[in-house]
Every structure is written in C-alpha cells, then in structure tokens.
Amino acid sequence: MKIRDNMIDPQLRPAGVWLRRLLPRSSPSRLRRGSLALGHIMDLAYRRTPRGLRVEEVWIDRPEGSRLRVLVYSPTAPVTAATGLLWLHGGGYALGRPEQDARCFRRLIGTAGCVIVAPDYRLSTELPYPAALDDAYIALLWLRDNAIRLGIRDDQLAVAGESAGGGLTAALTLLARDRGEVNIAFQMPIYPMLDDRMNTESATDNDAPLANSASLRAAWQLYLGRGRTDDDVPIYAAPARATDLRGLPPTFTYVGELEPFRDETVDYVEGLRAAGVPVEFEIHPGCWHGFDRIVPTAEVSRRALRSRERWFRDAVRTHFAPQPEPELDHA
C-alpha cells in the first residue's frame, strides 16, 4: 500500500514528510544500533520525576536469577481501591523504555487515579521471544500480588500498550487466559503489532511514516529469532495467529488508516466480536502509525486521545474480574 503525501491528514503531513526522510527503511542491524543510541538518549532525557506523579523503581527476580526493572507510577496522594494498569511500552519489540510514556501516564492517572506498573522488559536486541512476554507476565503477577501495598483492587487489573506494547498486551491477555493464574479486567492494545506474516493489504509494501513494511519486517525478524519457521510461530508471539479469542477481556483500540497495522487490527477486532468480547474500535483517517504521540496537538490526535481516556474512565467504572481462587494443596 503506497502512501502519497496528499493521503495524510494535513495537520500530520509536515511531520510525516520529515519522518519518511529521516527513517526511510530499516534492518535488524540498524535496529540494534538504534536501540543502543535510544537507550543513551533516554538515560539523559528521563532522569527527572514527571511533574504531578510519584515514581517508584522496583526490581523483581526472574526465575533464572536476573532481575526485571519495573517503574510504578501513581498519584502523589495515597490511593485506595484504584485500578492497577500494567503498561507495556512500544518500539517494535527492539526499542524503548517505560520512561518514554510518562506523558501518557500523567493523562491516564489524571483521568482515573490509577496506579501504573511499567516493566522495562527485555528487548529483542538482547533476547528474542519469549523474553519480553515472560517479563510482562512476571510483572502482571507482581501487580496482582502487591495490590494491597499499591492501593489497588485486585479485581481490576488491566493491561495496555501502544504498537509493540499493544502486541504484547494482546499476547499477555491470551497467555493469562490460558494459564488461569490471573484475571484481567480489560485491555487497551493501541495500534497493536500483531501479525508477523504481514500479508494484509495495508502491510504489503507500505511506505508510511515512522513504521513501514521494511522496518516492521526487520523488527519481526529480531523478535522471533533465528531458525523459527512460519509454521512454528506461537500465538503468544503473534496474536493475530490465534483463532480462539473467547474469554478475552473487554477491549479498546484504534489504528491509523494509513499504517501497516490497520488490517491486522481490523481482523483482530472482528475476531473478538465474533467471540462475544465487548470491543470499541476506531480507524482514524489520514493517520500514520504513532500519529497521536508524534503530533499530539493535531485535531485527529486530540480526538483519538479523548476517546481513549473516555473509554478508560468508563472501563474503570464498569469492568471487573475477580482473581481465581488459589488451588488448595491436598498433599
């Protein structure tokens, strides 16, 4: 799907043209270099605590002995019976850190007074699938187990993320459903990265700004790792491959009309609806991937963010999922 400049929303067009020149194509090696450079930039850019939020850094032990860094964002005033939101950052599974989403956290916390747990999951430039998903699941269990200390209610744990974080959100809700150890009340996978096959119309030869077919193909190669064939990609790596979406939590998502993820998101939403899952979904005309983050002042970005916050506020009032009763040890 070739994207002409005149197809882009006028308020997004200048940034889109600039991004297409800056980030024309990518490869696994470029993503590795970009990950290191972005890490250094973020170390400098995010040293300060975001205004109006309290941030706690926590380290969680992984089964093999290493530790997962997790950031807990909450209102400055103590909270009780708040929503616990696990947030998974974007970056094609190869880039990013939780600090990059502080502006989004401020908006969500201001909307509903929630507590956000954001893991610094392992990137594909370090380890391929399932490292990132394993980290997300460890953080989800930690969120459940620390509900009282965090001032959240354990019957309202939610998961959200953008782009690759949206893909991890969809994967994590599948994994949680199938393992049966923790229940998720609702999910927000925003313009999610779901399908490694990239065979939809919107994902074929897409040269849109920021995320295009070439860069996404490179990102999937890194995330899935070497030696994996098309026949052995699990649904927890690429949730678009899942054929049974029954029992997943209520969902909100949106996607840009021009981005490669458009069609796979439409297919995912249709699958959720066919499975009886409540879904609210929007396609924003003239928008490329990440439009609301890069140009938040554009009217279409404002509409998208208002919709997200409205749905989140309503979900906090409406959607609950009590945790499973622990199994008794009869030994």
Image (cartoon, helix red, strand yellow):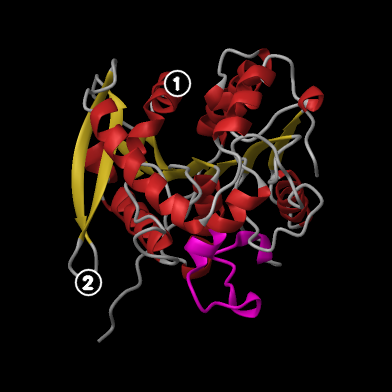
Q: Which residue is mark 1?
A: 107
Residue 13 x/y as whole percent: 69, 20
Q: Is residue 216 visible?
A: yes
262 or 269, which is in the foreground?
262
- Circle nearer the N terminus (2, 1): 2
| Quarter of the image with the N terminus in it | top right
Front one among 30 and 275: 30
Residue 46 seen from this side: no
Q: Which residues are magenta?
A: 220-241
The residue that disc 2 covers is 64
SS category of the residue bearing label 2: loop
**Amino acid on which disc 1 is placed:** Arg
Quadrant in the rendering for residue 238: bottom right
Which of the numbered marks, if any, corresponds to residue 281? none
Tell which of 146 and 15 is nearer to you: 15
* Outermost residue, bottom side: 331
Residue 257 belongs to the span the image colors magenta: no
Label pair 2/1, CB-CB below 8 angstroms:
no
Q: Is residue 136 above or below residue 73?
A: below
- In the image, taking residue 14 as reference, residue 225 lies left or right, namely left
Calculate the distance from the C-alpha at mark 2 to the C-alpha at mark 1: 36 Å
Q: How many marks?
A: 2
Closer to the camera: disc 2 or disc 1?
A: 2
Residue plotted at (31% across, 74% down): 328
Residue 197 % position (x, y): 69, 63
> Residue 4: x percent and y percent?
79, 31
In this view, 214 is above or below 179: above
The secondary element bearing badge 1 is classed as: helix
Residue at x-position 68% and y-position 46%: 261
For label 1, the crowd category at 10 Å Cα-Cα, with few meaning under 14, some 14 to 19 and many 20 or more, is: few
Which residue does the image show at 30% across and 33% down from the upper left? 41
